[in-house]
């Protein structure tokens, strides 16, 4: 049983760049040799077989065909709207190379590749998932691919299915895995190509050649609709302050984009907090000041946006978290034997340096416990489990109480807290994400047809009509540097953070003082899939400003 919307969306044909409209047999134009964003010598040593590959741009070919091939595809990491369209584009692209080509989906992420759990993706299966949200076609997972045992198991499983190319659809860590796999297989002449596709709703996988990661557009539109609804409610009831935490562990792109779309009274940008070396107390003072200013205008209500990863950007807390990550990695076995939160907090407090220990013990007990929770597969604090929005609401309440005692505030403050995360990860993709993702998948097929490996599919010039889109591939090594993970140096794709000298932040900074005291809310409403282009084919404010 499918909904009326899903039935109508199944008939939608995504747009393609001109270079791909005759099929995935394309003319490949190569640029010059490339380097890495940092730690060049280390990255070159680690990726000696794939380092320095040129950026590729496609031009339309004259049609034609290639030998049939079997290709595997993996959805890796958290869900993002449009993943099914990447697979659909890949499928159609492979069939344009040769109708006898076959596509296999490895189930539940990289784990399926290692454990040989797969299914062939036929036309009937693909057609049932075109233009739909979610990753439920083959499911996803967060297993890291980094050991020789994993690479060998994956190789054996690919050979059993006759697979000669893999496409890994994921974020920065997943595409780092793709790069490691590509390097290993090329260095050892295994005959397996590896291609990546840029996915993450957080928006932190982008650069000159990857204008945006897929899913960001849709997720921000879903969150902005919800924020707009809350703003309308706040302006109707006129008695609540809403503290809204938004996804974005390592960057504040979502919070910034939603602020540009909805004009809240306050929006914290983590990168600015770090740049200004702000303390938690300063953040609370700023929020309390906005509450007091609005109260003076008889507006005892408002909306504040908080990025999920804020706590990691407060310098004093960031230093604490870095020390905690190394401490817990070094004492994993001993720490793993502790049962209660109190035991874990006491264990950590006794091993931290004096400076970090002081910060740790100053935090509320609940936050201390949350900082000691299990790490994610990459060794990072699971900041989505830290209830920053509740912490800030409570601290602002305490600050206002002090201000009232000093005669600096006489308003009413009642807070509601929200976390918008999973609500946006599996939405039906916007027209932009449906088109962009389909083109990314088709470009991945073209990269495979051209015999390339260690590349990420790229589609750019996306603020223009699809006739002007430029597609091709970028070497994954070009985006890499070395970072500290699990107490060790690891090659990873550098995350793209909010640029404080960039146009999107400048637009926000120009308006936030007025938004703070005025009630200038914007209500974007739900995503529009059908209707005039100026309503249905929008791009994000971020992309629009960056490419202006």
Image (cartoon, rainbow, N blue to C red):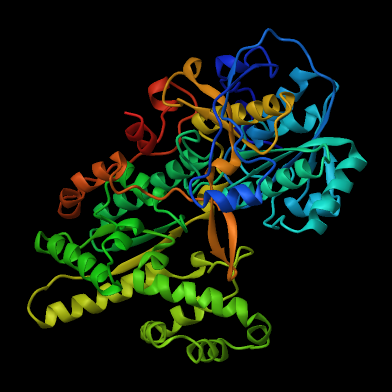
Residue 150, image quadrant? bottom right
Position of 189 compared to 310: left or right?
A: right
422 and 511: which one is in front?
A: 511
Quarter the C terminus occupies: top left
Q: Nearer the viewer, residue 217 or 60?
A: 60
Question: As displayed, is residue 54 above or below residue 411?
Answer: above
- In the rendered view, tell whether residue 146 sits above or below residue 253: below
Which residue is farthest right? 160
On screen, residue 155 above or below 272? above
What is the x, y in percent for residue 66? Answer: 80, 18
Measuring 56% from the left and 20% from the top, which residue is drawn there?
15
What residue is drawn where x is 75% and y is 10%? 64
Quarter holding the N terminus is: top right
Residue 137 seen anywhere in this rendered image of the structure: yes
Q: Is residue 25 left or right of residue 215?
A: right
**Horizontal and vertical percent for residue 135?**
66, 45
87 relative to 118, above or below? above
Q: Position of residue 117 (x, y in %)?
A: 84, 49
> Which residue is at the front of the view, 9 or 52?
52
Which residue of the protein is positioned furthest toward the top in this rendering? 62
In the rendering, at what x and y percent does residue 375 appear?
59, 70
Residue sitting at x 65%, y 51%: 46
Tell me which residue sits at (24%, 63%) in the image. 239
Q: Would you say residue 226 is visible in this rendering?
A: no
């Amino acid at each position: 049983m499918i909904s009326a919307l899903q039935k109508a969306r199944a008939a939608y044909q995504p747009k393609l760049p001109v270079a791909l409209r005759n099929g995935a047999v394309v003319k490949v134009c190569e640029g010059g040799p490339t380097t890495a964003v940092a730690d060049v010598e280390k990255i070159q040593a680690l990726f000696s077989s794939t380092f320095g590959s040129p950026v590729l741009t496609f031009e339309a070919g004259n049609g034609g065909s290639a030998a049939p091939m079997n290709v595997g595809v993996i959805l890796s990491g958290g869900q993002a709207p449009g993943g099914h369209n990447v697979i659909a584009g890949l499928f159609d692209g492979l069939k344009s190379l040769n109708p006898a080509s076959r596509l296999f989906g490895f189930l539940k992420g990289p784990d399926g590749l290692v454990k040989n759990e797969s299914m062939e993706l036929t036309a009937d299966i693909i057609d049932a998932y075109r233009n739909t949200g979610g990753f439920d076609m083959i499911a996803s997972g967060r297993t890291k691919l980094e050991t020789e045992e994993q690479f060998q198991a994956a190789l054996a499983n690919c050979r059993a299915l006759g697979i000669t190319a893999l496409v890994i659809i994921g974020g920065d860590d997943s595409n780092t895995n793709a790069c490691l796999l590509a390097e290993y297989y090329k260095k050892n002449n295994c005959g397996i190509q590896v291609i990546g596709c840029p996915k993450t709703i957080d928006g932190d996988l982008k650069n000159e050649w990857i204008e945006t990661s897929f899913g960001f557009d849709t997720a921000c539109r879903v969150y902005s609709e919800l924020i707009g609804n809350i703003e309308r409610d706040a302006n109707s009831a006129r008695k609540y302050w809403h503290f809204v935490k938004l996804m974005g562990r390592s960057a504040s792109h979502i919070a910034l984009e939603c602020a540009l779309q909805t004009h809240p009274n306050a929006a914290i940008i983590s990168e600015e907090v770090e740049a200004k070396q702000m303390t938690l107390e300063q953040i609370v003072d700023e929020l309390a000041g906005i509450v007091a200013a609005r109260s003076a205008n008889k507006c005892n209500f408002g909306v504040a946006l908080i990025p999920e990863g804020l706590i990691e950007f407060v310098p004093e807390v960031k230093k604490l978290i870095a020390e905690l990550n190394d401490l817990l990695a070094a004492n994993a076995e001993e720490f793993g034997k502790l049962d209660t939160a109190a035991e874990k907090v006491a264990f950590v407090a006794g091993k931290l340096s004096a400076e970090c220990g002081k910060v740790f013990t100053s935090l509320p007990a609940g936050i201390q416990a949350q900082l000691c929770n299990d790490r994610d597969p990459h060794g990072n604090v699971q900041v989505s489990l830290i209830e920053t929005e509740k912490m800030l609401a409570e601290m602002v309440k305490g600050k206002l109480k002090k201000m009232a005692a000093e005669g600096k505030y006489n308003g009413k403050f009642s807070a509601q807290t929200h976390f918008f995360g999973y609500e946006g990860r599996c939405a039906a993709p916007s027209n932009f994400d449906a088109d962009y993702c389909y083109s990314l998948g088709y470009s991945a097929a073209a990269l495979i047809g051209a015999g390339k490996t260690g590349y990420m599919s790229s589609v750019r010039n996306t603020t223009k009509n699809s006739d002007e889109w430029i597609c091709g591939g970028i070497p994954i090594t070009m985006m890499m540097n070395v970072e500290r993970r699990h107490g060790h140096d690891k090659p990873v794709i550098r995350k793209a953070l909010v640029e404080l000298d960039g146009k999107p932040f400048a637009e926000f900074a120009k308006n936030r003082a007025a938004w703070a005291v005025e009630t200038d809310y914007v209500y974007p409403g739900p995503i529009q899939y059908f209707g005039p282009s100026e309503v249905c084919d929008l791009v994000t404010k971020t992309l629009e400003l960056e490419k202006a």
